[in-house]
Image: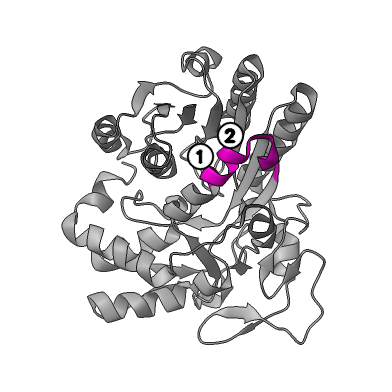
Amino acid sequence: MRIAITGVCGFVGSELALRLARRFAGAQIVGIDNFSRPGSETMRPRLKAAGVAVKHGDVRCASDVDAIGDADWLIDAAANPSVLAGVDGRTNSRQAVEQNLVGTLNVLEFCKERGAGLVLLSTSRVYSIASLNALPLMVRHDAFAPDESAAWPHGATGAGLTEEFPTTGPVSIYGATKIASEVMAIAYGDAFALPIAINRCGVLAGAGQFGTAEQGIFSFWLRAWASDQPLTYLGFDGTGHQVRDALHPEDLADLVEHQLRAAAGASGTWNVGGGPSNAMSLAQLSAWCADHFGRREVGADRAARRWDVPWVVMDTARARARFGWTATIPVVTILDEIADHHRRHPEWLSISQPL
């Protein structure tokens, strides 16, 4: 088997490459990366040592994608992952669309020409911001939690969001590019008989994750806390009650292995996350950090922010029913892993932050 990965030197792309190399004996794994993210160059030696071939390439350029060569499967892990992409001053809106949507179209053309399957890494941020803000929630133990006594909308329960939760816009430019990519991927799969697995991921977290909030809030918050950098609770009255569920890349690799082995049976849209047992608020994460690195003050900005949402937890029942998959690595184990990496690499936050 020959597996291609775009964004192979990013956190998710590199972790999948390393873990799939161990899971598929004899497989050839090749990837491209444009090395635009600070810290991505550091991944190249690890990948080379594992036998992963890395080429410089940008998914916005069709000829760069074609230069990958042949592949049985392509895993698309190249994206600007920030919900503020296109409006944060780092990239403009056209760049965000080119990266996250035009790149997907080039990847789909690559798959069409080779009859290759596609694993598209999408996001929970395709879900309706208005619907997420309308969920019946209460505060429990310094975190937003489901109010089970209230009526819940279709596609959501206390167990999390299902794939049927509304994707009605606006969902941010980032979310719009990802759901548009999903629509195009499904169309290409239907038109050209390609297996298409769309994984709507929660918050991936683990050692070696890049040091910005949009790359992964769990890793960024922990490292910034340990480095005594300023931290602020943004929105939601400055409480830090907003909740996300953490997903370790080993668990994602386990699902992707199931999908590659299932071939055409992998097609579908799948919610992928740590679920309720791995859900944690920023305030709870701060309490964990205080226990491990000492107490400190956190600022509070009470102003509501346009694309913020209070509670995003993924219900993975569909993936469990189809592949027998569930996340197995607890959030506390993930945090311990990140903390250990920080102690060994205290410079990592500065290496991987934008200039």
Residue appearing at x 47%, y 55% in the figure? 251
User: Is label 2 in a helix, a strand or a loop?
Assistant: helix
- Between 52 and 188, the one nearer to me in the picture: 52
Q: Amino acid at mark 1?
A: Asn
Q: Is residue 258 magenta?
A: yes
Q: Is residue 200 above or below residue 317?
A: above
Q: Which mark is residue 314?
A: none
Magenta stretch, residue numbers: 256-268
| Disc with the residue nearer the chain's start (2 vs 1) | 1
Residue labelled with disc 1: 80
Residue appearing at x 73%, y 50% in the figure? 170
- Determine which quarter of the picture holds residue 179: top right
Given contact means CB atoms under 8 Å apart, are the residues at marks 2 and 1 in contact?
Answer: yes
Residue labelled with disc 2: 100
Residue 315 at what x, y percent from top left?
65, 64
Residue 9 at what x, y percent from top left?
37, 35
- Between 257 and 128, the one nearer to me in the picture: 257
Q: Amino acid at mark 2?
A: Asn
Residue 185 at what x, y percent from top left?
70, 32
Left or right, 69 with respect to 348, comes to right
Magenta portion: prevailing SS class = helix
